Image (cartoon, helix red, strand yellow):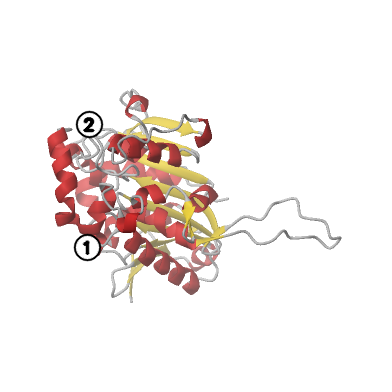
């Protein structure tokens, strides 16, 4: 493992496997940093995709965070399926926790399909609350015990341009231009390109007669605690491109119906010039909705509606981003993450917004 010291006081090490750890070079800061931030890249990506974001987190929060950029699913390994990647990520997170016994809290920051992988992983990492703790007099403590993620307190769960509703609905993959024929054709051939991951994204995986994986991830089932784990985090945040993201559409990344997409105006905020809309959505009780029609079981509209309702059972902060005036707007899917500092630096205000609003307790 090689350690590099940056001029801004940020230390980083990269393993032979490609994982990247980032922390403060100042001993007193690194010893007090008890908040693990797991950064997860997207399809065909690598740990270096979050290099800029990781360094900014540590630079701004040197005594609070230790950042680990995931490497277990790099490059072609991202084609193995959301479930397989989620299992690998869960194991990787446990390995990091074991190596850093001072860690007490955990947050996730994930880009694109990495957000789905992180959702799967936390379902595996969830630990149910311990039995009620009693004080010396035998009375139950007022504070109810909470579950954990790998033994750590769950704080922030942040996704960036993640297709939470899948990719097969109308205009969910913008480069298909919303043409129904193209979208139907993509559903039939996507597995030739993106293999199992493509099936999961286009909701065409009916393994052993089971519903698509993204639908199964709306419940706690088969020893996984997908929704219990998601509900455990104190903040759940969605950063979404309103336009020019040719890979992931606005609706799927912001968990909204088409009729719920807000009208946005150009930002007048000099600090965050590309953030054009913010919304705090409270948790909705799925039982209050009318029963979904069971006609046409393979309807993407029906499946999408089920995904919206299921994921709306927890609260979300929705942050909408626009690079419409950016020189690199056609690369919005990468700019929002600052995947490459030289090419995508116009997305730096989005990273700053994440850091400025990051929760610690």
Label 1 element class: helix
Q: Locate residue 322, reporting x and y percent.
A: 28, 33
Tell me where residue 244 sits by quadrant: top left
Judging from the image, what secondary structure is the residue with disc 2 in?
loop
Q: Position of residue 343 (x, y in %)?
A: 19, 48
CB under 8 Å between discs 1 and 2? no
- Kindly indicate the quadrant of the structure image that contains residue 326: top left
Residue at numbered disc 2: 324
Specify few, some or many for label 1: CA neighbours under 10 Å numbering under 14, 14-19, or 20 or more.
some
Identify which residue, 198 or 114, lies in the foreground.
Answer: 198
| First reached walking from the N terminus: tag 1 or tag 2 | 1
Marker disc for residue 75: 1
Q: Nearer the viewer, mark 1 or mark 2?
A: 1
Q: Identify the residue at image location x=48%, y=33%.
A: 281
Label 2 Cα crowd, 10 Å radius (few <14 / some 14-19 / many 20+) = some
User: Where residue 280 sits in the image (x, y, percent)?
Assistant: 47, 33
Using the image, determine if residue 240 lies above or below residue 74. above
Question: Residue 196, can we see it?
Answer: yes
In the rendered view, would you say 339 is above or below 11?
Answer: above
Q: Residue furthest right?
A: 137
Q: Position of residue 202 (x, y in %)?
A: 25, 47
Q: Quadrant of residue 42?
A: bottom left
Q: Is residue 59 visible?
A: no
Q: Is residue 145 left or right of residue 248?
A: right
Residue at 27 percent across and 49 percent down: it is 201
Q: Residue at x 38, y 32 (%)?
A: 293
In 3D space, how far apart are the residues under numbered discs 1 and 2 (Cα atoms)?
Answer: 29 Å
Identify the residue at the far front of this view: 295
């Amino acid at each position: 493992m090689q350690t590099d010291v940056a001029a801004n006081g940020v230390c980083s090490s990269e393993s032979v496997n490609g994982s990247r750890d980032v922390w403060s070079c100042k001993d007193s800061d690194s010893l007090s940093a008890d908040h693990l931030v797991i950064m997860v890249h997207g399809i065909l990506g690598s740990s270096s995709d979050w290099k800029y974001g990781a360094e900014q987190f540590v630079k701004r929060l040197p005594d609070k965070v230790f950042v680990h950029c995931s490497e277990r699913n790099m490059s072609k390994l991202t084609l193995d399926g959301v479930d397989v990647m989620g299992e690998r990520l869960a194991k990787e997170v446990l390995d990091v926790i074991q190596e850093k016994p001072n860690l007490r809290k955990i947050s996730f920051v994930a880009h694109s399909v990495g957000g789905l992988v992180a959702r799967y992983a936390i379902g595996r990492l969830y630990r149910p609350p311990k039995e009620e703790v009693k004080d010396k007099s035998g009375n139950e403590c007022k504070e109810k015990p909470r579950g954990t993620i790998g033994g750590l307190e769950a704080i922030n769960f942040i996704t960036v341009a993640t297709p939470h509703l899948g990719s097969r609905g109308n205009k969910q993959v913008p480069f298909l231009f919303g043409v129904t024929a193209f979208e139907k054709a993509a559903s039939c051939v996507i597995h030739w390109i993106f293999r199992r991951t493509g099936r999961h994204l286009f909701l065409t995986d009916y393994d052993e007669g089971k519903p698509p994986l993204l639908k199964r991830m709306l419940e706690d089932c088969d020893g996984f605690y997908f929704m219990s784990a998601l509900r455990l985090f104190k903040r759940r945040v969605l950063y979404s491109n309103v336009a020019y993201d040719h890979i992931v559409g606005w609706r799927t990344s912001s968990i909204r119906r088409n009729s719920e997409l807000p009208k946005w105006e150009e930002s007048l905020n000099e600090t965050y010039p590309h953030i054009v809309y913010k919304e705090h959505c409270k948790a909705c009780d799925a039982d209050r909705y009318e029963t979904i029609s069971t006609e046409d079981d393979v309807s993407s509209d029906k499946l999408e509606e089920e995904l919206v309702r299921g994921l709306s059972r927890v609260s979300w902060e929705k942050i909408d981003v626009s690079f419409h005036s950016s020189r690199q707007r056609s690369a919005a899917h990468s700019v929002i993450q600052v995947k490459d500092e030289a090419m995508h630096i116009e997305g730096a205000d989005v990273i700053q917004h994440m850091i400025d609003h990051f929760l610690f307790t």
